[in-house]
Amino acid sequence: MIAKNFEQVHRHIVGTAERVGRDPGDVRLVAVTKEHDTDTIAEGLRAGAKVLGENKIQDAQGKIETLGHDGMEWHFIGHLQKNKVKFIFDLFDLIHSVDSAALAEAIHEKAQARGTCMPILLQVNVSGEASKFGMDPDDAPEVIHRLASLEGVKIKGLMTIPPFDADPEKSRPYYVRLRELRDSCAKLAFPNVSLDELSMGMSNDYEVAIEEGATLVRVGTALFGPRPSTK
Ligand SMILES: *Cc1c(COP(=O)(O)O)cnc(C)c1O
């Protein structure tokens, strides 16, 4: 079942990218493994998963200890509390969900102490929903400016989570807004900042996200089925 799902999602990614004249190689699938056990994740790896997404440090620790890092990347996609920052360096290759300048500064400080640098995406709340984490789009240029000189973080792009709607077309305006925000920030040409990555799109709307420029789609349910908590 999981192998079939991967095949189908992969086919949809390639088909959608080609339809809008994009290189399918520019779209990476983040297989969201939150709530799933290591047996299920191992099945995903056999089905071709290269990038795995987890949203809780304490859940990810055991899984990553068991499965390791060989031939795969682990990405953090959840809300990161400052007191958990110290754990991310041994676990994750990219943090999608840096939702404030203060959090980025905390990552920078810990990274510097370890003599390393953490690649990050800035999470932007393009919908303005009060329940969503992420910075105000209007603040993004100033935040990027402030973070550009920090050696412990490397900004790679932007991420967003739109309000859930069963109709994928409802997500499109938010994905357009994130792309336009990226384009306008990229024009400011901050040194040490690349804004190539757009992390947007989930099981129900990743095709729309790819049409609008997503380079990382975060897909869980369409690959692994419903999560235990939603069954
Ligand atoms: C759970 C989660 C996803 C995956 O959602 P699905 O609808 O199962 O594809 C994507 N992004 C984030 C940030 C998540 O927390």
Image (tube, rainbow, N blue to C red):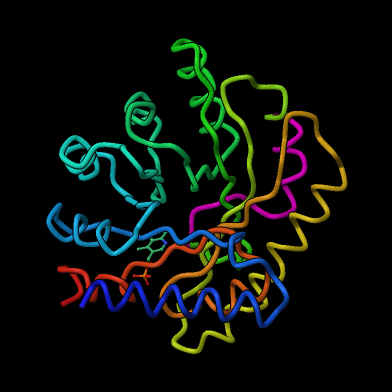
| In the image, residue 135 lies in the stretch drawn in magenta | yes
Give the extent of the magenta segment: 131-146
For the view shown, which residue lies furthest in the bottom direction? 167
SS assignment for the magenta stretch, majority: helix
Task: Report the front residue among 207 and 26.
Answer: 26
Q: Is residue 215 left or right of residue 196?
A: left
Question: Looking at the picture, how far across and down is residue 115, in whole percent?
Answer: 49, 11
Q: Quadrant of ligand 1?
A: bottom left
Residue in the picture at 68% in, 62% down: 178
Q: Is residue 124 left or right of residue 79?
A: right
Question: Looking at the picture, how far across and down is residue 160, in whole percent?
Answer: 56, 60
Residue in the picture at 70% in, 79% down: 20
Task: Report the front residue among 8 and 92.
Answer: 8
State how many labels appear: 0
Question: Looking at the picture, how far across and down is residue 68, in whole percent?
Answer: 24, 37
Residue in the picture at 35% in, 42% down: 71
Identify the image quadrant of the N terminus. bottom left
Identify the image quadrant of the C terminus. bottom left
Quadrant position of residue 155: top right
Task: Report the front residue among 222 and 188.
Answer: 222
| In the image, residue 174 lies in the stretch drawn in magenta | no
Quadrant position of residue 6: bottom left
Quadrant position of residue 146: top right
Residue in the picture at 35% in, 58% down: 49
The relative height of residue 168 versus residue 114 in the rendered view (above or below) is below
Q: Is residue 3 left or right of residue 92?
A: left
Question: Looking at the picture, how far across and down is residue 4, in whole percent?
Answer: 28, 78
The relative height of residue 49 versus residue 8 in the rendered view (above or below) is above
